[in-house]
Image (tube, grey):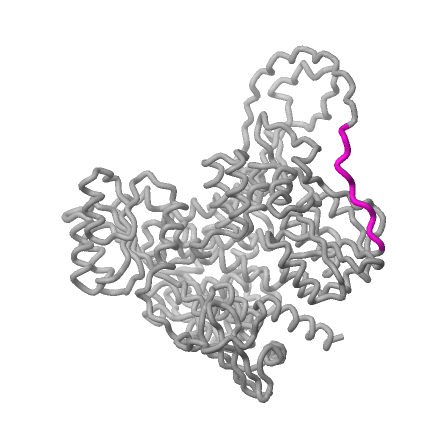
Amino acid sequence: MNGESPEGIEVLDKLAADGLVEPFDYDRVLHHAQRHAERVEEAVVELGVVSEADLLRTVAEMVRTQFVSTEKLAKAQVSRSLIEMVPRRVAERLGAFPILFDRKTLTLSVVTYDLQAPEVARQLQVATDARAVTTYVARPGAVRAAIRKYYYGEVDSFTELMRPKRRRAAEPEAAPAGRGDYIDVDFGSEELGGRRAAPAQAARPAPQPRRQPEPPPPPPPAPVVMEIADASLMAALSGSPLRASASAQAEPPSSPSNAESPAPASSSSSSLSVSPRMFLETLNVMVTLAEQERGELRGHTSLVARLTRKLCELVDMPKEHAFEVVVAAYLHDLGKTGNYHLTPLNVAQYEGHRIQAQKSFAAPLRLFESAALGDKTVKTLNHLYERYDGNGFPDRLQERDIPLGSRVLAVVETYADITASAKNPFRRRLSPREACEAIQGLVGTVFDPTIVQLLQRLAVGDEVRQQLLDDAHSVLLVDPDVESTTVLEMRLMEHGHRVLIARSFDQALTVLAEAEVDLILTEVDLPTHDGFRFVERCRAGSQPDTPVIFLTRRGDRESVQRGVELAAADYVVKPASPEVVAMKVGQVLSQSRRRQSHGVSGSLREMSLPDVVQILSNGRKSGKLTLTSSSGNGEIQFGGGAISDARFGDITGADAVYALLALRDGEFALDPSFLPLRNAINLPTESLLLEGMRRLDESGR
């Protein structure tokens, strides 16, 4: 995650301007969207800040169209012929799903979450045979669910979205009537794809029956004290409904007649349920705090958990299984005391590590013995040190007999250790490519070949993406207060930054002597010397142009003026929201001109050409992308993210782009110093990609 604003931020701004989102909720939504890499619209509904109806009315008002609720989209029956009209790749790239086609007028109707609805309509006209395209708006999650349901056959894709979201106390249900003329369009329940049914009109509301006087409210019930046994806590947090005590019996729902007589606390049934996401968030915070004194291993577990989740997705692991494996990733190092970091690589290579691991491999399970860990979590932790060739422990399992979660976690923990810590068998931090090569050398003996191959795709793809965007940054955080910087460190890491920590003036100078950083975030009040003196030393030494942000308790005029005199990029007075500070860091880094452009190269097997083009386009990059393959050589020229010209053999212009997009094997190299001299292709990058994908789909039929 980087420091840029999440997609859909315009919707959040509009909701705030309309008074539907308070300033505090604005920050919550922003942080939630950034943290989970999702659009703002989903974060607003998931947090219960705004109802789906109010959200969609606001978006419809912005786009000047109507909206389709998730419930109605879930009930719609779309014909196969209509689905085939819009290629899957086009639907996914545009975030649009077809719902109707009028054969008389050749008008295609789609739902989308893109705020540039006219552009979506124009590109769909290019990609289909429709004479006109009508767009409606829907939730991003609903559009994606519809795509999964009809293009991938996931019949339960709407299940999660249709579950009731939490609402605030005293928050009224959204009124069914639309705001202004922006209404929820009802397409009926019959199969869609033929002639369009007339959408529901904004009818005059029917007269309401006279309300009967409400009975007086019942007296407040006596408070119920709920006690949760330790053995049930983990299951409760995992989302399993639990009784308040082991002896409590489930009570049938109370009838209206006895609603005013609540049952005594001793006989009530209570449950504690926490969503998997909230549970993992809690684990993340707890483990991060526990790792504060681990030196170079600070943040190791969070990195392992993040990579484990991504790798579980790549192996198509079921969500429930993946959740338990990620829990194991968070717990895998807890209780393993001693001087050694017991990674599967270290344990396989060093006898001392192996002996210590044999004594402590079950430490996390003993710590959580009363917490009812899931079966997959237990197996993943118990068999972390098994080897693919059967020479591991405790059960000498081999190959596919080793639990999948254990095989994934073994590869991920080793990769995280040798790329993030210098205290590894190689005595230095390895690059992603070097780490993958090192792990590849142990394939078939220690590690699963398939898992290693997937890790290579994941790790090298992320590295190439960061190189293309030039957005992998190191931040030096200088602050003696451990408590106040812990959450900020987590936020900066979540935004994709590598964070170096210094607690004093001298320690900060030592860090700068050993590593180059892209930004300094410092407190003014430091031991021995203040932050102003530290920045002066940086300016006079090896970091003369490094951007500096002061994050300090000092808010007096003299201190602020001193910061300005030292050419600070920003001066933030505590207390400040960690999310806001992380975004400020991202903005300063994106504006910095200190980093020199450099070339990037890679393999089309590691990252497809459409992905490379999309990254360069979204990042508004300029340069020349050279492609070499067995089919021939070519190039694509970029100016500010737009494709200005292309060549593939004797083919030039847009046709060359379409031909190059079909390449699956080969190498690419980006020269960012190249500036195009002319614009021979006057088409948006998205249109070129869509047409290229359409031609690929047709050639594959």
615 relative position to 52: left or right: left
Q: Is residue 265 above or below residue 193?
A: above
In the drawing, does residue 658 fall left or right of residue 559? right
Q: How many labels does the image show?
A: 0
- Residue at 61% x, 21% y: name it: 266
Q: In this view, does 468 lie above or below 655?
A: above
Q: In this view, does 650 lie above or below 499?
A: below
List x then y, in percent, for residue 232: 57, 37
Can residue 665 be found in the magenta stretch? no
Quadrant that contains the C terminus:
bottom right
Residue 133 placement (x, y as % from top left): 72, 57
Image quarter for residue 417? bottom left
| Nearest the eye: 538 or 556 | 556
- Residue 475 showing in the rendered view: yes
Q: Where is residue 324 in the image (x, y as percent from the top left)?
A: 57, 51
The extreme left residue here reads: 528
Which residue is painted at 60% across and 85% down in the image?
651
Decide which of 30, 497 is in the foreground and name it. 30
Percent across and percent down for residue 691 are 66, 71
Q: Magenta part of the protein: which range?
A: 195-205
Q: Residue at x 58, y 83 (%)?
A: 652
Q: Is residue 203 magenta?
A: yes
Residue nearest the viewer, comparing 493 with 227: 493
Task: Name the main secondary structure of what is drawn in magenta.
Answer: loop
Residue 390 appears in the rendering: no
